[in-house]
Image: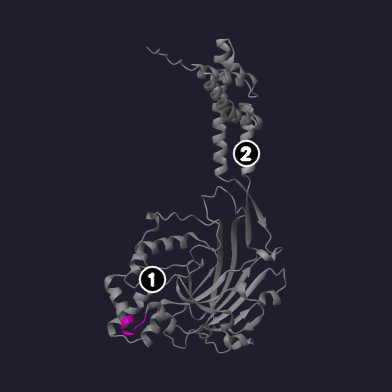
Amino acid sequence: MAKTSILIATVRHFYNTTTLHGFKYLSSKFFSDRVGWLLCCCASTCCAGVLCAVLWERFTEVPALITLRDMLAEPEILRLSNIAFCPTAGNIAHLFQQNLITDDEIRVRLSAVLNLVLRRKPLTESQVEVLERALSINNLTLTAALFKLTPPCCSLLRACRWLTMTLPCGDIFHMELTQWGLCCVMRPNQIDLSSIMTPRFSTSRRLQVGMQFSNDTDLYGCEFFTKYPGEEWVEPMVLTPGSNYFASLTSKSMVDSNVEKLVNDKCVYRERYTKSNCMIKCIEKLCTCSDPMQANDDNSTTNLPACSIRRLNCLRSYKYDNLTCNCLPSCRKVSTILSLESSSLNAFEYTYDNFYDGLNASLAIILNLQIKINESKKFIVHPTETWITLLSSLGGVFNMFLGVGLFSALEILFLIFVKLPVALRRSTELTPQKPHSHIPKI
């Protein structure tokens, strides 16, 4: 009982001396004062709790201010998309038929099978057997056959003009494996000629390419796509022979400027990260093999073996929505708008430009691509709620409804960790010891 009375006296003394508003009335000798102030304190505490929950909900939603950056005035943030030209499935099948040892059945069905593989579609059992037999007869894997049979970029792309200079296509285009097969890829950000030959505040970049895959009239056209680092899945467009294309490319990017934010469960801020690549990596782990037709865009490493033709169906059959891969979107969202117009290519012989020398008007493809920097936009997201603003808002709520400030919190901590333990120890020291019974000796 002595311990309890000392602790109650210590708490009552705290009520009488604390700076917390209204709490000293809880030790009043009048019952009505204690009940009235207890109800007021409970109501204030409930209001403070509701407002704190609202503030936390707003903080986790990360409200932000979006600003538009001038890409021409800040050339260090200027990034151009990668440009790729890929042989179509018909071209690849023709190369397989002409250069691989095959029988009549394989030769007839190979084009349709390769078209499904390059389009990332699942194969039937008979189609798997056709492609496996074609590759096993020649002792090749699918990627090895593509690298062996696809001609170099300098043979596929006959004429190239970047900015104002005509260049060998092999100097600016390099053969790379992409999700659409083996393609000739140009990375404008890695070409030094752009900074030398173009004014700093130029509003556009121009690329002109003349393509002619062969003099064989049975061959098809090519596929063309552009992709920014960090851009999500893109679909290639088919360019047909005998056409002159005029393309205009603009981009829009949304970048989160706060890298070190502590509440970040809505997106991933990592260079070249995309949600689609994350999903593909997750499916590869589930299928225990890696996709041989997938480019390593995010520079990540994998120890999984390459999938065989039969195991590719595992990768192609999974439905992304049914997976629990926990793949968040990227904090850097990039999207492009490509407008494309075409006309018939029928006036080669009347031009004085040597760019068209050696091209056949009925088999060639001319692409004139203009990258419009002045119409591209980059938005920077600046979060308006930080830990500092959250703490200041919570401090205002507690001070308004409870009268709790920094020193009040120190008083409560001092009561719990200092005063009460000291009072408890003193009560133990003051507790009288029970006398020992003395039994006299007889």
Front residue of 297/119: it is: 297
Residue at disc 2, secondary structure: helix
- Amino acid at circle 1: Pro
Mark 2 nearby-residue class (10 Å; few <14, some 14–19, many ≥20): few
- Where residue 166 sits, quadrant-wise, is bottom right
Compared to 103, does 122 lie above or below?
above
| Mark before the other along the chain sequence, 2 or 1 | 1
Q: Which mark is residue 391?
A: 2
| Image location (x, y in percent) of residue 93 | 38, 80
Residue bearing mark 1: 305
- Amino acid at circle 2: Leu
- Where residue 122 sits, quadrant-wise, is bottom left
* The magenta segment: 134-140
Q: What's the residue at 59%, 45% (across, down)? A: 63
Question: In the current view of this chain or complex, which residue is farthest to the front?
Answer: 442
Compared to 74, does 387 lie above or below?
above
Mark 1 nearby-residue class (10 Å; few <14, some 14–19, many ≥20): few
In the shown orientation, is residue 291 left or right of residue 35? left
Front residue of 442/86: it is: 442
Residue at disc 1, secondary structure: loop
Q: Quadrant of the C terminus?
A: top left
